[in-house]
Amino acid sequence: MRFRTSLLCFCLLLALFLVLPISASSQISPDPQIMAEVNQIKAVDNHTHVPKVVGPGEKDDDFDALPCDPLEPTKAPLMARPENPKFLEAWQKLYGYKYSDIDPAHVRELVAMKQQVQKEQKDNYPAWVIDKLGIEYMLANRVAMGRGLNPSRFIWVPFDDALMVPLNNHAMADTPDRKVFYQREEMLLERYLGESNVFTMPAILDNYVAQVITPTLEQQKKAGAVAIKFEAAYLRSLDFAEPQEQENALSAIAPGRRLALPSPFHEHRVQPYRAPQVTKVTSSRPRSQNKPLHPRENSRYEIGDALARVAA
């Protein structure tokens, strides 16, 4: 009896294995009706540095708070190299590129086609691109929005690391990359100070919070920002901690100028006082009005070699 039961199980398993390849092969192609429905679903792109439309001689410098152009040259990641076949696929779908190579003459033809589309679409060009890509909404990580970035499709996420660096950051700029990045953050902070009509650095951090941090975040929210972006990993280690009361006492800046702290250790102990002020302002409103944090998660290979040589 046991033998007959085992033999029956074996036969059933054998029949199952013989049928499975047939079933699997019949499912190689997706159901066309299901795919038609899926292809109608529009995407939400939650991390872009979409450029604005510029005219002749104009330049877009607001696509990132920490652009990598000034850094030491590095090898492009595989996905960004010209030989990546995805570029050909994109050119073919967007502009009707009819070649399967990147011959210089063919690429010049492509550039002419792209320029013609931009000329025809004018300020609608960014929306035309995301329509082609099947994207309904695009979160734009930018210092400021600009021409062609319709807020009904392109949703602003501003950068706010600059609000955490009101002091002299010389001790923190301990690599070539960080030297460039802190200079960029200080330039952005000057811009935020001007937009808040603050032309002399407040004397104490409490006043800095009230006169600079809060007005800046409120202005960003009023302009349509739905989140704020931090790139702190490019600037320092991420060991933020709750500041102690005695450290909060170290809240003097220096009227009209930036106080230099003696070492990165001291700056690391003071920055945690300022970081919660940024998040506190964003969370002190009703939940429906909050701006979520949007930390940057780029690979270290997307930026200069110097950052890859230190512990972030």
Image (cartoon, rainbow, N blue to C red):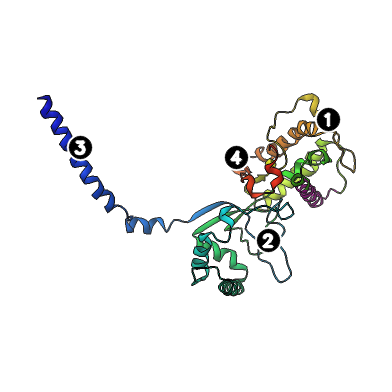
Where does label 2 land, which residue? 146
* Residue assigned mark 1: 250
Q: Quadrant of residue 212?
A: top right
Q: Position of residue 295 (x, y in %)?
A: 63, 43
Q: Mark 4 = which residue? A: 287
Amino acid under label 2? Gly
Q: CA distance from mark 3 to mark 2?
A: 64 Å
Q: Which residues are magenta?
A: 180-198
Q: Image quadrant of residue 168?
A: top right
**The label number, if any, that marks residue 13 in the structure image:** 3
- Say which amino acid is labelled 1: Leu
Which quadrant holds the N terminus? top left
CA gap between label 3 and label 4 equals 56 Å
Q: Which residue is more in the foreground, 223 or 117?
A: 117
Q: Are marks 2 and 1 in contact (CB under 8 Å)?
A: no
The residues bearing labels 4 and 2 have C-alpha atoms spaced at a distance of 28 Å
Q: Earlier in the sequence, mark 4 or mark 2?
A: 2
Q: CA distance from mark 3 to mark 1?
A: 75 Å
Dot 1 falls on a residue whose secondary structure is loop
- The secondary element bearing badge 4 is classed as helix
Amino acid type shown at disc 4? Arg
